[in-house]
Amino acid sequence: MYAWWNNGQLFDTFRRQHGIPLFLGLKCFDERYQYGDEDRCIPTAFGHRPSPTIWEWLTRDGANAPRYNGWKEFWQAVNLRNRLIERFLKAYGVKDDEYFDMFATDSTFSFVGNHPSLPHDEESVRLARSINAPLANQLLSLKEPMLGMAGVEELFLSKHPIGHVEKRTQNTCRHTLFLTMLLTEMQKEVLVENQLSQISVIEIGGGYGNIARMMWETNTFKSWKIFDLALVSRLQNWWLTKSQLSGDGRERITLLADHELHEWIFHQQEEEEQKQQRKQQSLGLAPNKSNVLNVLVATHSWSEMDLSKWFMYFNALVRGKKKNTIGWILYAYQLEYAQLDHDATKMKMKVLLKYYDIKNSVMTENGDVRILVLRKKENK
């Protein structure tokens, strides 16, 4: 039995330390408030103020909150908050099992959308089956790991009974749509049987790792690299390891913190790229199709970055790769944010469509989200 460390326990230890001016994102459980949710508070320079967490107070309205001037300031707050938690976890030797076993109900990770009370997404399943029913059903048939649900197992099972394909989690439903759209388009260019098992994927913002898991268990891949916030990379490592992927699936997934992007690009070996290119040619690909097996998965996280950071990833992963260029992009963005940050969204789409053609486009989540499958243009 693990002694789980929720944010309240983290704060209880953290607040006793000297020289720590901020408790960003950590629940404040003053002894007199310990037993009433409505009495939870956050520390300020002037005492305490009622609120579930500092994190929720800071981010309740996302980048559109008056506390932020767009996505850049919002994600700066995210990074600061995560660094504080990571520093604490390291300093006190908190094990991953102790912290992540209840991540699904921790507001710290609410953005990954894995709370057990979230409903099944019928719309995504319906759309996926309309595109490619056999593939969609194969993805939905995968057993879901019940991880991060400490203390809420009964709630999870009541919403998502084991083996009930029509009651999969919201994320699995949506990830089924993502992968069905992508793989269906890619299959149209397959020249050799089982060729798609050799795809190389880079993912910007990977949640807790579910898309990589689903792809591996249905299609496999040559490699999968996820760039994310350092704390989220730590969650992904825990979740993917605990998921017990078949074969050598876990070994093929590399987790990188976002600040490691440029170093990773620098250390890519020319010899490895040439070896991959020779292998693709041996599979029967024409030279101008050598990017057919290279995929960028960017569902939400990339689209929500400010322009400077968005271009950092574009220049490093898309424009900057001379060999084995990204042939496909799976891209998704929320229309609400697109409307509020219209000029930035317009610029991002203009750049993408300069280099890529739209192969499929779907509106989902009641018209709030647009998903695109993009294919590299010839001679671009």
Image (spheres, rainbow, N blue to C red):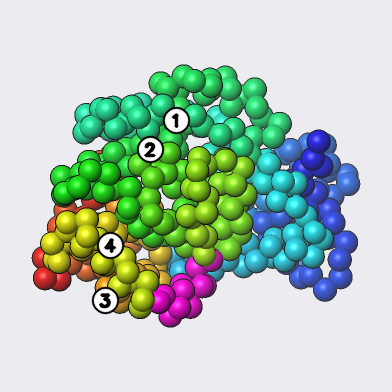
Please tell me the numbered disc located at residue 279: 4
Badges 2 and 1: C-beta atoms under 8 Å apart? yes
Q: Amino acid at mark 4?
A: Lys
Note whether residue 221 is visible: yes
* Picture residue at 44% right of the left edge, 64% below the top: 71
Q: Is residue 145 magenta?
A: no
Note whether residue 304 is visible: no
The residue wearing badge 3 is 322
The residues bearing labels 2 and 1 have C-alpha atoms spaced at a distance of 8 Å
Q: Nearer the viewer, residue 301 or 75?
A: 301
The residues bearing labels 2 and 4 have C-alpha atoms spaced at a distance of 22 Å
Q: Is residue 262 magenta?
A: yes
Q: Position of residue 255 (x, y in %)?
A: 52, 60
The residue wearing badge 1 is 142
Q: Position of residue 268 (x, y in %)?
A: 41, 75
The residues bearing labels 4 and 1 have C-alpha atoms spaced at a distance of 30 Å
The residue wearing badge 2 is 218
Task: Name the N-terminal-most of marks 2 and 4.
Answer: 2
Q: Position of residue 122 (x, y in %)?
A: 35, 26
Residue most extreme to the left: 378
Q: Amino acid at mark 3?
A: Lys
Badges 2 and 4: C-beta atoms under 8 Å apart? no
The answer to whether residue 86 is left or right of residue 228 is right
* Picture residue at 75% right of the left edge, 46% below the top: 98
* Picture residue at 51% right of the left edge, 72% below the top: 260
Residue most extreme to the bottom: 266
Q: Which residues are magenta?
A: 257-269
Please tell me the numbered disc located at residue 317: none
Quarter in which the C terminus is drawn = bottom left
Disc 4 is placed on an element classified as helix
